[in-house]
Amino acid sequence: MPTFSTLTFEEHVVIWAAVDLPTLLVLRSCSHNALTVVGEVLRASVSLLCRQFLDDTAAFLQELSHCRGVIGGQVAVRFMLRDLPFVPESLEVYVPPDVHLEMQRHLLDTHHMTLLVSFDSPENADEAWLADHALHYTDVLRTQQGRTIILHRCSEAEPLAAVACAPTSAEVTYVSPEGFGTAYPALLFQHRALVADWAHDDRNIGALLDWRRRRGIDLRMAARVWPEYRGMYCAAAKWVCHTQPRTFTDGGALAVRFSPLQGPREESTVMWRLDGRPCGGSCLHVEDAHGQKLYKYTILVEDGEEYRWSYQHRFVL
Ligand SMILES: [Zn+2]
């Protein structure tokens, strides 16, 4: 009679295909064997999602790892919400500025894509908007099968700065060949999301509402509309306040490596807040090392033997 440890990998993939991610994460903590199996199942899940856009996913993921890039957007959300299947419309890739051309060449040469929108296209003319979202510019590529790849040249060495500037909390989510994470798991796994700043994203409001309707995500302006948070003017204690400064490795974030036993975890250097809408608590008055308090995101960098918040971007009010 087959047991958990004697099943083939293909059998594991079939069995776990319909299991949601929180359950898989509980399972992987049960034993070394479960850790290995779940890690491989999740890696296969990343590869399957990418295969909707690329044939040679192994080459793509190897290049993505080499470039220290991450996958964000709809594919990352779809990876997290295994129990809410939808077909992503595009594959969004975020890479540091120094390797952007290398990744672009890889997509054009190895995967024979066509470049539809490049850095000097009208779509990239809004430099203020791009800077506010930690981006230099965005390439749009089309595969031979007609699928869309969006390649973001980030303005920061850590691509997660751009992921943090997503239009909703659900998309503050990433997947890479090494692992995955999301900043608002308590909301995302309940199929909920908070709206980020609208002041600079007005052109996206229609798309945001459509995103909610078609994906089954309950999109709101503040957490207090949901029963668990009712009566809480500020939900920072639950890590779901829209004004609260956050990082990808704080106590409210989910950060998972496929192989957690191989070396120490890298800390993220990105801090952000979803929006500057007052929450009713004191989050808006949290100051950084420079006494500034209304920035969208900031990067922690090494300065000699000290660390300091050296780069701030965008007033959100
Ligand atoms: Zn708050």
Image (cartoon, helix red, strand yellow):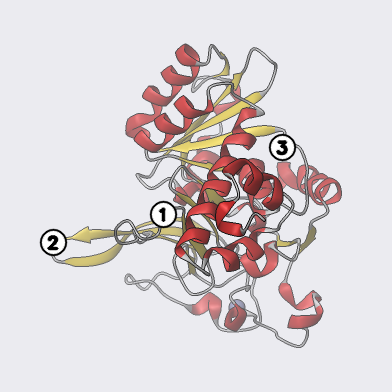
Tally the marks. 3
Image check: 298 left or right of 138? left
Disc nearer the start of the sequence (2/1): 1
> Which residue is situated farthest in the right direction here?
213
Disc nearer the start of the sequence (3/1): 3
Image check: 285 left or right of 205? left
Q: Mark 2: few, some, or many residues within 10 Å (few <14, many ≥20)?
A: few
Question: At which x and y percent is residue 72?
Answer: 57, 44
Under 8 Å from ligand 1: the CB of mark 3? Answer: no
Q: Amino acid at mark 1?
A: Ser
Q: Amino acid at mark 2?
A: Gly
Under 8 Å from ligand 1: the CB of mark 1? Answer: no
- Where disc 1 sits, the SS reads loop
Name the residue tied to disc 2: 304
Name the residue tied to disc 1: 259
Who is closer to the viewer here, 76 or 34?
A: 34
Who is closer to the viewer here, 192 or 246?
A: 192
Q: Is residue 233 visible?
A: yes
> Which residue is situated farthest in the bottom direction here?
231
> How far is disc 2 from disc 1 in space, using C-alphas?
31 Å
Q: Which label belongs to residue 196?
A: none
Report the residue at 52% width, 47% height from top: 40
Q: Which label belongs to residue 88?
A: 3
Which of the 4 image quadrants contains residue 262?
bottom left
Who is closer to the viewer here, 2 or 222?
A: 2
Who is closer to the viewer here, 39 or 172?
A: 39
Question: At which x and y percent is residue 175?
Answer: 53, 47
Q: Is residue 100 above or below residue 31?
A: above
Q: CB atoms at circles 3 and 2 under 8 Å apart?
A: no
Q: Nearer the viewer, mark 3 or mark 1?
A: 1
- Where disc 2 sits, the SS reads loop
Q: Mark 3: few, some, or many residues within 10 Å (few <14, many ≥20)?
A: some
